[in-house]
Image (cartoon, helix red, strand yellow):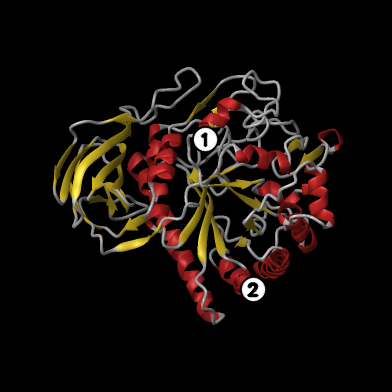
Amino acid sequence: MNTNITISKHFIKGDISPRLFGSFVEHMGSVVYTGIFEPGHPQADNRGFRLDVLEKVQALNLGVIRYPGGNFTSGYNWLDTIGSTDERPRKIDLAWRGIEPNTFGLNEFFEWLKEINAEPIMTINLGTKGIDDARNIVEYCNFPGGTYWSDLRISHGVKEPHSVKLWCLGNELDGPWQIGAKSAYEYGRLANEAAKVMKWTDDTIETVLVGSSTPRLESYPEWDRIALEQAYDNVDYLALHNYIDKYDEDDLTRPPKNERDDTPTYLAKSHRFDRQIEEIIATCDYVKGYVRSDKTMYLAFDEWNVHNQPQKEHHDFEIGSPVDWCYFTMEDTLLFGSLGLSILRHADRVKIACQSLLVNTIPLILTDANGASWVNPTYYVMQHLSKYAKGHVLQQNVVGPTYNVEKMQNVSYLDTCITESTDEIVIFCVNRSEEKQVMQVETDFELLKVIEHIEISHQDLQAKNTRETPNQIVPKQIYDSIEMQLTSCHAYLAPYSWNMIRVQKG
């Protein structure tokens, strides 16, 4: 089967933000404790940071990392996490039914983040806390000195401000599972006032308004409209969250009851990301007109991923007991790639995105306590996107074969997005078909040579990277798969494969 794609240097969809491919560290399960932080581990440094994990995170080239949650933030007291670790309280975490020792706190996070070279996104507590707490944490993190909160930071050994520019105004406060859940109007008013005083404390920051936690809620997208109407002038982004699984269960925390989707249906579900993004863009633009604003609202897709069932048991009220510790299969990896491409295709409006989560919970990186670390195959897709999706997204005209399933119609066998930077064109492509596909790209760019064609595939779609076989699914260089001419290229793509093709341009 053949798919023809036309692109032009004159038709650019949008600029790619350096914040578009980031991740998420939450105090949830074993993300922090025995994930990125495990004092006494053979590969931990004197700060307790696991260097085997740190090395893998560094190789991802992430733009942003969101912290400390998530649902965790709606019961979060940042004051518990600063100062001498010996004096920090040990508390119950109600969000994930764990024990939080607070030995990895606010300043430890920023020290760890310096090793990553990513920008922080801090989430404040608007569940059990409010406006005063919001301005105080901004002052502690960002004010140079000479005030109570900034001097307290300095007394904790941190002379220079953390200079956090991105702040999420709470998390999923539309959800009944959330501590301090609120109506859209109630939340929008609170978020507006919090954002106002936070920006008065530091007028260089940007704020992210909570949007619907999932399109599955009946309040979607009305929640987004109502909240945004209250806070439009004082926020810069609206948040989106979504996780795609094979079951279509409303509660992802319980074992599934519905039958699993077949492969064609599962891989088609990335269309839900496209639809959600476009619906929220429409909502934002309606509110822009309603409030008579000249400002365009951008989107922060700050929780996204595929979802699978846990392979380690969680035990309530323990430190670092796993939550949703799972493997991802080759099939999951293909859908993960398509979800990333849905976000990338909307780079004109989606400016921030965080894969959720980085380590041990539906993760890119897996660890065992006092043991090894390795990566899910989704890690490699994320690495390709974060490292090579730079510059601009090009508009593409795609003509090729499609298929229908009960839940979606007119699904392209080839899911593509093409980017252009100073020196190269990068073609990202998922082959959703069980057959080899031919992709022809026509352009008015001068194409000089193929830099590389990297493929991720496996003959068994249920294959996974386990602790015993951590390299079952890895990227591989493909040679002699592309025929080049001055303004076109033909690529031969393996069945059920993720592909990244880099072409040098004139």
Query: Among all residues in the image, which is located at the extreme bottom?
Result: 292
| Number of other residues with Cα within 10 Å of mark 1, as a class: few under 14, some 14 to 19, many 20 or more | some
Residue at position x 65%, y 53% in the image: 164
Position of residue 72 measured from the top left corner of the image (x, y, whole percent): 69, 46
| Number of other residues with Cα within 10 Å of mark 2, as a class: few under 14, some 14 to 19, many 20 or more | many
Q: In which quarter of the image is the N terminus?
A: top left
Q: What residue type is labelled 1?
A: Gln
444 relative to 250 in the view: left or right = left
Residue 343 can be seen in this image? yes
Position of residue 131 measured from the top left corner of the image (x, y, whole percent): 77, 63
Position of residue 201 measured from the top left corner of the image (x, y, whole percent): 73, 64
Is 298 placed above or below 268 here?
Answer: below
Question: Element under label 2?
Answer: helix
Residue at position x 64%, y 42% in the image: 26
* Residue 231: quarter of image: bottom right
110 relative to 129 in the view: left or right = left
Is 36 placed above or below 225 here?
Answer: above
Is 315 placed above or below 246 here?
Answer: above
- Select label 1 or label 2 by which is in front: 1
Q: What residue type is labelled 2?
A: Gln
Residue 411 or 247: which is nearer the viewer?
411
- Circle number at residue 230: 2
User: How many marks can you see?
Assistant: 2
Residue 73 or 182: which is nearer the viewer?
73
Marks 1 and 2, how far apart in space?
39 Å
Question: Element under label 1?
Answer: helix
Residue at position x 75%, y 49% in the image: 75
Is 187 placed above or below 440 here?
Answer: below
Q: Which of marks 1 and 2 is nearer the N terminus?
A: 1
Residue position for label 1: 58
Position of residue 233 measured from the top left corner of the image (x, y, whole percent): 61, 73
86 relative to 23 in the view: left or right = right
